[in-house]
Structure formats: C-alpha cells, structure tokens
Amino acid sequence: MKITPDLTDEVLLKLIGERLARRRLTRNLTQEQLAEQAGLGLRTVQRLEVGAAATQLSGFVRICRVLGLLERFDTLIPEEAASPIAQLKLQGRKRQRATGRKATAPGEAKTWTWGEPS
C-alpha cells in the first residue's frame, strides 16, 4: 500500500510497523535481537511493528538506525533551503525562531483616525 495523505493515523502507523517488520526479517533479525541492538525493550519493538501509537519517537529512530534506514530520513524530512532573499537578510546568521508581526517602537506607533489624510 502506498503512503498517501488521506490515510488515517492508525492505518499509517500500522503500515509503517509492517514495513519495519519486513525490513527486520530481510535482515534476518528476531524481534529480540532488534530490541537488544537498538537498546529497547522487546515490547517496544512489538508495539511498533503492530502500529501501536504508544511508542516514542526516540525508539523509532533507534530501530531505524539498526535497520539501516536513517539515511532515508533526509528524504522524509528534507532540509528547508532559505530563499535567496532570506539568505541575503540572514547573511551568515542562523535563524533562531519564527517571527510574527514586527513590533513597532513606542514612538513610531501612530493610530489612524477618520478624516486624516492617508
């Protein structure tokens, strides 16, 4: 089954779990061996493979590391490239947070009222 945006979370988790289980089997690993190599409990591996939502992202990353899937994360979540204009504005500075509206200095704020020319 192809992963598409219209899949429910439950179906998506089950599909990911099935794919991880198949990958584990192609590497000829038991669930116990995978859990040991990933530094996780057997139950965590079992829950992930059946698509249980109670697994942590860190456990998922550890399992993907053992199964040789980390390099594919770059495809899953590509690094966002800044636009050329944003690159000029940043000029070597790394963006630290998202910005909302720019705050105006206390002396700059001027309220418009009816009857004033624009």
Image (spheres, grey):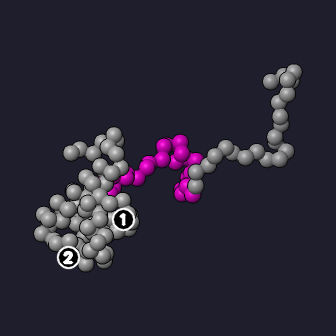
- Alpha carbon distance from label 2 to label 1: 18 Å
Q: Residues within 10 Å of mark 2 (few under 14, many from 20)?
A: few
Residue highlighted by disc 1: 55
Q: Quadrant of the N terminus?
A: top left
Residue 92 in magenta?
A: yes
The answer to whether residue 95 is visible is yes
Residue situated in front as seen by the camera: 101 or 86: 101
Q: Nearer the viewer, mark 2 or mark 1?
A: 1
Residue highlighted by disc 2: 33
Q: Earlier in the sequence, mark 2 or mark 1?
A: 2
Residue 16: percent from the left, percent from the top? 27, 55
For the point 40% across and 53% down, the residue is 79
Residue 72 in magenta?
A: yes
Residue 65: percent from the left, percent from the top? 28, 68
Disc 2 marks a residue whose amino acid type is: Gln
Q: Residues within 10 Å of mark 1 (few under 14, many from 20)?
A: some
Q: 27 left or right of 94?
A: left
Quarter of the image where one finds residue 55? bottom left
Extent of the magenta region: 71-96
Residue situated in front as seen by the camera: 7 or 100: 7
